[in-house]
């Protein structure tokens, strides 16, 4: 009898937790800036910190997330199948091979973007809310239907930008859409919490004036910086091997993503990889990398 | 340039208001305009309808009745119709068509000042039939369009258009000026090259002089 009551209580607590699920959209406006790389590493980082996380690919027709997560061959049912009622959520969720707390919901390769309906997406998200603490939505590029659906239900947004003018402008545009068109804005609730992630940052090139600096970007966007990910060949290598780059332990990029996850979860960590390494005399003479 | 021009309300004297409509005026716009009027003034009773374009006379009576219904909600009555190049009949639907003396076309009744405290991002357009105050940043490619004055207390990098609808007295005040385009009453200037140092990213005011040229001068503090 006592056990019964306890279990009941636990279920009740569980229901409360489900309400606190946070939907985080990873978005940018511009393509190729690192949204999917960030989604994969951020979701993995959250899961490694002990939070049950699902990452959803909203790029219907051009799916990439499953490739980066290395679960391409295990995609049998996808997001659109669930929306259309052709599969259950349970059938479509793919458990990550390295991490117990992490699940992937892949996008369809064959359907087009119109397959995402607002009601359908809401239904799936509400179902996921019951089981997961974090729902990471990997947005497609652009500002059309897929991108809009990815951000519409968001509680928080990671805006990914490169240190380059057109990328920063597009991020500004996306911030405008978040502030005016997201469900929170439409309902008149507290606005979507915005975080800035700058990827492909190269402090040497910033010093030479080839790239926008962190201060330049902040001056335009005026939102808190969650992290700066340095430019690195490790990212491409990780993508090719089908593992989120955060798993390449010890590399700068992996460390930067761990910092991002820690800051997102409330830890106070100073920004790293934002100043150029001072080259010693020998290095300056002999070059090297 | 903009559509917010399609409806206008002027106070002619203490009892009469001139309601200027064009074919693109929506009935809801009339209702919101009259609601604004009532916030300013609770005493006036009559409206004079002025047409900004040639109306379709076969539909005009039914259109007039719809305006009557809206006006009645705000305790107003459409008493006269203003004679101009588009209206030449002596009376329409029992209402006299009168010539408005030029002196009666006095100050416009504008909406309340619109206060924006969030950054105005790229691609966002803010319009108000009245003044606009932005306390934060106006990004590149954002548009601020006001019938009255515009004040920007943050960085101003977008497009600012004051006096939309023809108010040549409207002014623009900016704390840190780096706008792409400025306009007052439709007279505009694209700012392509970097401005002189005393204006670039400085506090400035922008106004039309008597020859209708746009002036940008440092704001003396």
Image (cartoon, helix red, strand yellow):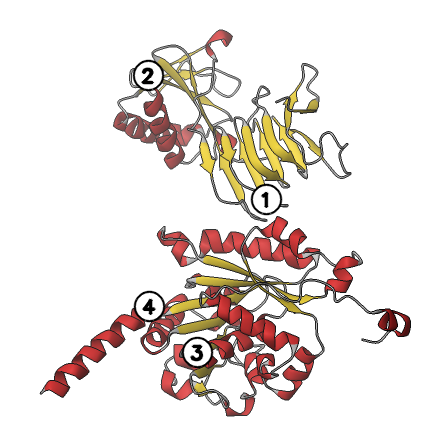
Subunit of mark 4?
Answer: A
Q: Do callouts 2 and 1 point to residues on the same chain?
A: yes
Residue in the image at 52% along x and 28% along y: B147
Quadrant position of residue A259: bottom right
Helix, strand or loop at mark 4: loop
* Position of A99 relative to A267 (above/below): below
* Residue A210 visible (yes or no): no
Of residues B85 and A137, the one nearer the viewer is A137
Chain-order first, disc 4 or disc 3:
4
Of the numbered discs in the image, which one, if any, rests on residue A54? 3
> Which residue bears the numbered disc 1?
B142
Residue in the image at 59% along x and 61% along y: A29
Task: Give the CA separation, mark 4 to mark 2.
Answer: 56 Å
Of the numbered discs in the image, which one, if any, rests on residue A207? none
On the image, the x and y values in percent for residue B215 come to 69, 23
Q: Do callouts 4 and 3 point to residues on the same chain?
A: yes
Helix, strand or loop at mark 2: strand
Task: Give the CA separation, mark 4 to mark 1.
Answer: 35 Å
Helix, strand or loop at mark 1: loop
Of residues B205 and B167, the one nearer the viewer is B205
> Which residue bears the numbered disc 4?
A20
Tell us which disc is closer to us: 2 or 1.
1
Quadrant position of residue A32: bottom right
Tell us which disc is closer to us: 4 or 1.
4
Q: Do callouts 4 and 1 point to residues on the same chain?
A: no
Subunit of mark 1?
Answer: B
Task: Give the CA separation, mark 2 to mark 3.
Answer: 63 Å
Residue in the image at 45% along x and 62% along y: A156
Task: Give the CA separation, mark 4 to mark 3.
Answer: 15 Å
Of the numbered discs in the image, which one, if any, rests on residue B46? 2
Q: In which quarter of the image is the C terminus of chain A?
A: bottom right
Helix, strand or loop at mark 3: strand
């Amino acid at each position: 009898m006592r056990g019964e009551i306890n279990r009941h209580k636990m279920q009740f607590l569980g229901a409360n937790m489900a309400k606190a699920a946070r939907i985080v959209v990873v978005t940018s406006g511009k393509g190729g800036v690192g949204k999917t790389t960030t989604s994969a590493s951020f979701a993995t980082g959250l899961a490694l910190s002990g939070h049950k996380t699902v990452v959803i690919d909203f790029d219907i027709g051009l799916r990439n997330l499953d490739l980066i997560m290395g679960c391409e061959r295990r995609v049998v049912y996808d997001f659109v199948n669930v929306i259309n009622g052709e599969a259950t959520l349970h059938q479509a969720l793919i458990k990550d091979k390295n991490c117990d707390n992490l699940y992937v919901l892949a996008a369809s390769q064959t359907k087009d973007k119109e397959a995402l309906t607002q009601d359908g997406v809401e239904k799936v998200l509400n179902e996921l809310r019951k089981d997961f603490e974090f729902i990471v939505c990997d947005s497609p590029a652009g500002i059309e239907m897929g991108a809009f659906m990815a951000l519409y239900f968001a509680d928080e947004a990671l805006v990914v930008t490169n240190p380059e003018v057109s990328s920063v402008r597009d991020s500004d545009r996306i911030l405008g859409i978040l502030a005016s068109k997201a469900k929170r804005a439409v309902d008149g609730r507290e606005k979507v919490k915005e975080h800035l992630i700058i990827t492909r940052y190269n402090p040497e090139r910033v010093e030479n004036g080839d790239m926008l600096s962190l201060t330049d970007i902040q001056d335009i966007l005026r939102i808190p910086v969650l992290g700066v990910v340095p430019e690195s060949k490790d990212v491409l290598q990780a993508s090719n091997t089908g593992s989120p780059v955060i798993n390449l332990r010890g590399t700068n990029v992996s460390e930067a993503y761990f910092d991002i996850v820690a800051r997102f979860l409330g830890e106070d960590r100073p920004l790293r990889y934002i100043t150029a390494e001072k080259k010693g005399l020998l290095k300056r003479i002999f070059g090297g990398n | 340039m903009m559509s917010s021009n399609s409806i206008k309300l002027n106070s002619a004297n203490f009892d009469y208001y001139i309601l200027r409509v064009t074919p693109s005026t929506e009935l809801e716009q009339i209702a919101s305009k009259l609601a604004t009027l009532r916030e300013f003034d609770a005493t006036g009773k009559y409206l004079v309808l002025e047409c900004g374009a040639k109306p379709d006379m076969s539909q005009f009576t039914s259109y007039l009745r719809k305006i009557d219904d809206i006006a009645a909600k705000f305790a107003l009555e459409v008493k006269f119709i203003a004679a101009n190049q588009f209206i030449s009949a002596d009376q329409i639907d029992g209402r006299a068509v009168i010539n408005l003396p030029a002196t009666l076309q006095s100050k416009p009744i504008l909406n309340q000042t619109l206060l924006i405290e969030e950054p105005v991002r790229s691609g966002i357009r803010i319009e108000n039939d009245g003044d606009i105050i932005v306390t934060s940043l106006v990004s590149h490619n954002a548009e601020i369009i006001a019938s009255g004055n515009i004040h920007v207390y943050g960085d101003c990098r977008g497009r600012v258009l004051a006096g939309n609808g023809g108010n040549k007295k409207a002014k623009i005040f900016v704390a840190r000026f780096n706008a792409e385009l400025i306009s007052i009453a439709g007279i505009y200037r694209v700012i392509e090259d970097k401005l002189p140092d005393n204006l670039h990213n400085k506090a400035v005011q922008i106004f039309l002089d008597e020859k209708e040229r746009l002036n940008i001068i440092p704001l003396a503090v």
